[in-house]
Image (cartoon, rainbow, N blue to C red):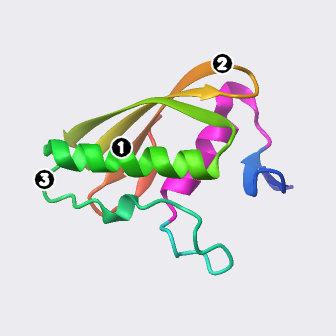
Amino acid sequence: HSPYTLSLHDALPISTSHNDFSHIKEGIVQILGTNVGERIMEINFGSEVYKVQFDNIYDELTHSELKFYIKECIQTWDNRVQVKSIDVEPVNTENFAGLLVNLKLTAVKYMQDFDMSVQISAEGDVNLNA
C-alpha cells in the first residue's frame, strides 16, 4: 500500500496522512525540488530555484530572486495554498550550507494559516526542515 494517492484534480501525488497539512508540505517540497524541464511529460512543471546562484548565501539579491521563484512556482502548481510571506535566512554550519526558507501559507480549502520551512542547499537539494 503506497503512502501516496494520485490526485487527478491537483496533478500531484498527495500523501494520505492529512494531519498538520503534511500532504501540502510534501507537495510543495516536490514542486521546489523539481527543475523546470526535468519531467518529460510535463516539461513546465517545477521550479526555477536551480537558477539562483548560491555563490553568496548572504546576498539580498539572491534572497529576492529565490523568493520570486518560490512564490511563482507555488502559485502556478499548487492551488491548495496562497503564499502570505517568504523569509530567507542564510545557514552555514558544519552540517549544512545553504538557505533556510520560511513560508507562511494559507490552506485555501480550510482558510487556515500554517507555516513550513525548507532547506535549500548550495547544490539545489530541497528538504523539509522538521
Please tell me the numbered disc located at residue 67. 1
Q: Position of residue 55 (x, y in %)?
A: 14, 59
Q: Is residue 60 visible?
A: yes
Q: Helix, strand, or loop for circle 3?
A: loop
Q: Which residue is mark 3?
A: 56
For the point 75% across and 57% down, the residue is: 11
Q: State yes or no: discs 1 and 3 in contact (Cβ < 8 Å).
A: no
Please tell me the numbered disc located at residue 87. none
Q: Position of residue 106 (x, y in %)?
A: 60, 25
Specify the amino acid type for callout 3.
Asn
For the point 58% across and 33% down, the residue is: 82
Separation (CA) of disc 1 from disc 2: 22 Å
Q: Helix, strand, or loop for circle 1?
A: helix
Q: Helix, strand, or loop for circle 2?
A: strand
Please state the extent of the stretch shown in magenta in the rendering: 16-34
* Residue 22 figure quarter: top right
**Pointer 2 or 3: first along the chain:** 3
Left or right: where 25 falls relative to 69: right
